[in-house]
Image: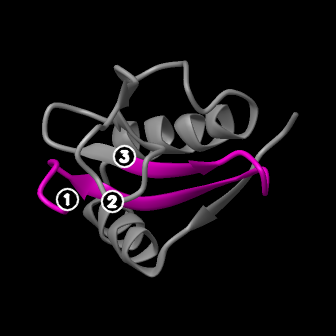
Amino acid sequence: MAYVVFLSEQSKAELAAIKKSGDKATIKKIANMLLELQEHPRTGTGQVEHLKHFVFEETWSRRINKQYRMIYEIHDLEVYVSVVSLRSHYGDK
């Protein structure tokens, strides 16, 4: 089952800022993670972690680098993943 991946307005803005910074390694890692989310959002690279204290029950995290994490929500019934943030450090509970 392939999931459709959507980026929130916040994550789109954060991705634009990362691209503007010129950090090619981080950009490549994010691109690979987004591809992984389509096939298996609960496993893969980046220390995948189920976050327990968020409003939405299926909120997950992946480490992008030491500084940033990808925060996303998995919607199994609708078969999509919503990326909430790319630069979060768990501050948006």
Task: Find disc 1 in the rendering and name its residue.
Answer: 93
* Left or right: 43 in relation to 17: right
Quarter placement of the C terminus: bottom left
* Left or right: 37 in relation to 88: right
Q: Are there few (<14), some (14-19), or many (20+) residues within 10 Å of tag 2?
A: few
Residue at 49% x, 73% y is 8
Quarter placement of the N terminus: top right
Dot 3 lies on which element? strand
Q: Which disc, if any, is residue 12?
A: none
- In the image, 61 versus 16, the foreground residue is 61
Task: Find disc 3 in the rendering and name its residue.
Answer: 70
Residue at 77% x, 51% y is 77
Q: Are there few (<14), some (14-19), or many (20+) residues within 10 Å of tag 1?
A: few
Q: Are marks 2 and 3 in contact (CB under 8 Å)?
A: no
* Left or right: 90 in relation to 1: left
Q: Nearer the viewer, mark 2 or mark 3?
A: 2
Rendering coords of residue 24 (x, y %): 39, 44
Alpha carbon separation for disc pair 1 and 2: 7 Å
Q: Are marks 1 and 2 in contact (CB under 8 Å)?
A: yes
Task: Find disc 2 in the rendering and name its residue.
Answer: 55
User: Which residues make up the magenta segment?
Assistant: 71-93
Q: Main structural element of the magenta stretch: helix, strand or loop? A: strand
Dot 1 lies on which element? loop
Q: Are marks 3 and 1 in contact (CB under 8 Å)?
A: no
Q: Quadrant of residue 49?
A: top left
Earlier sequence position, callout 1 versus callout 2: 2
Dot 2 lies on which element? loop
Amino acid on which the number 3 mark rests in the picture: Met
Alpha carbon separation for disc pair 2 and 3: 17 Å
